[in-house]
Image (cartoon, rainbow, N blue to C red):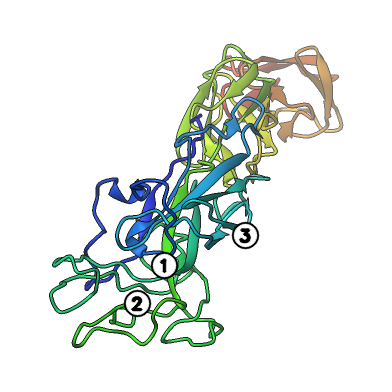
Amino acid sequence: MNNRYIKILVLISCSALAIAGCSSDNSALQSPSTTGTDANSGTISQKNFSVLTADLNPSVIDETANTLTQTSVEITAFIGDRNNQVLTDSHTINFAAEYGLIEPSCVTENGECSVTWTAIKFPEPGGPGDDGFATITAYASGEEGFTDTNGNNTFDDGDATFDDLEEPFIDSDESGGFTAGDQIIDVKSTNDPTGENLVHDIADGFFNGSGCTHSSLCGDRKITTVFARVSMNLIVNEILSRTIGGTVTGLDPSSTGVVLRLNNVEDLPINANGDYTFTAEVDDGQTYTVTVLTNPTLPTQTCSLANATGTVSANVTNVDVTCATNTFTIAGNISGIPSGETVTLQNNGGDDLLINADGAFIFTTPIADGAGYNVTILVDAATATCTPSGGTGSDTVSGSNITNVTIGCI
């Protein structure tokens, strides 16, 4: 089974108009620079809003005990202004988690604040976190970031790109963009002045921030209704894989053995009684089905299963196999019995069979495959002697009923 780890990915919302600040390097993970201890109050810029964790890969699952071993992770938000300066005044950072529990907000001090995310139970099969990821989104009042090409601290016609933000959301499928099934975070925006329309609002195509002088791209909202969005993906629980097995009883050690099949994935030959386990494993929450692919021969046996299907939540050890040797009947024909007389036959010294007329006969007790049979005359007819003919009276049962025992009376 695989170890479970937490991995952090930071995704900053962008549009086609906002390619600046969205790169494949780790620049988004850097906290804003500081030039000293002077106080700096202002507006959070999207380009300087990031979320970090001190431990990128904390193990959270004890595989042997199947328990959460480290259930809490500290999440820290860093903020800065458009000039890459740490904001020393207080700003409220909000958090939303796809899976687990997270403190709803924190207030920054000297450009940062932290909350605790906690995993309190394993993800439900098919539910949030079941894919091995939990997405956390942090958001706050601020302004869209831009590339200040001419260095005048204002978004104007000389600046080519900006972060045209859509409404924040929880990226449940880790697609990098909003798709059906992602969790909406309603906030006030140009498209939703009340912040309560219950739909995901797309970017408005304008720069929303203070000090905008662009001739065509300045939005109506300045500093209070634009929310910076950072999404963080935590690998909190890769799916646990479980073993499937049980115990075999009744298998004839001289037989060819039984072959079991698991979920049409693995065929397992078994040649002895005792415990068995498939090599292939089944993920937590998934179903398993064990079938008998091939029954034993030489002698032929039929094997039945207990607890052959179910849903995995732990290692399965009770798919028990019970094998029993097949049995077959001994039968034939008798002729020449004098009228009014009887003949008594035996098989293997027992199972007495009284016959009073010519024709077919069959012994009551079947014989196990691979065992011998021996038909003899216990009591002859009063005026005739009866004997099996042509060596048909004795042999070994081999996978089918015996129907050719021939007895003649003279």
| Residue sitting nearer the eye, 110 or 233 | 110
SS for dot 2: loop
Residue 272 coordinates in the image, percent (x, y) = 60, 14
The three-letter amino acid code for the residue at tag 1 is Thr
Residue 236 coordinates in the image, percent (x, y) = 53, 43
Mark 1 vs mark 3, CA separation in Å: 21 Å
Question: On residue 43, which mark appears?
Answer: 1
| Residue sitting nearer the eye, 62 or 296 | 62
Q: Which residue is mark 2?
A: 210
Q: Are marks 1 and 2 in contact (CB under 8 Å)?
A: yes
Q: Nearer the viewer, mark 1 or mark 3?
A: 1
Q: Are marks 1 and 3 in contact (CB under 8 Å)?
A: no
> 141 left or right of 284?
left
Q: Which residue is mark 3?
A: 104
SS for dot 1: loop
Q: In terms of sequence position, does the residue under pointer 2 or pointer 3 come before the other?
A: 3
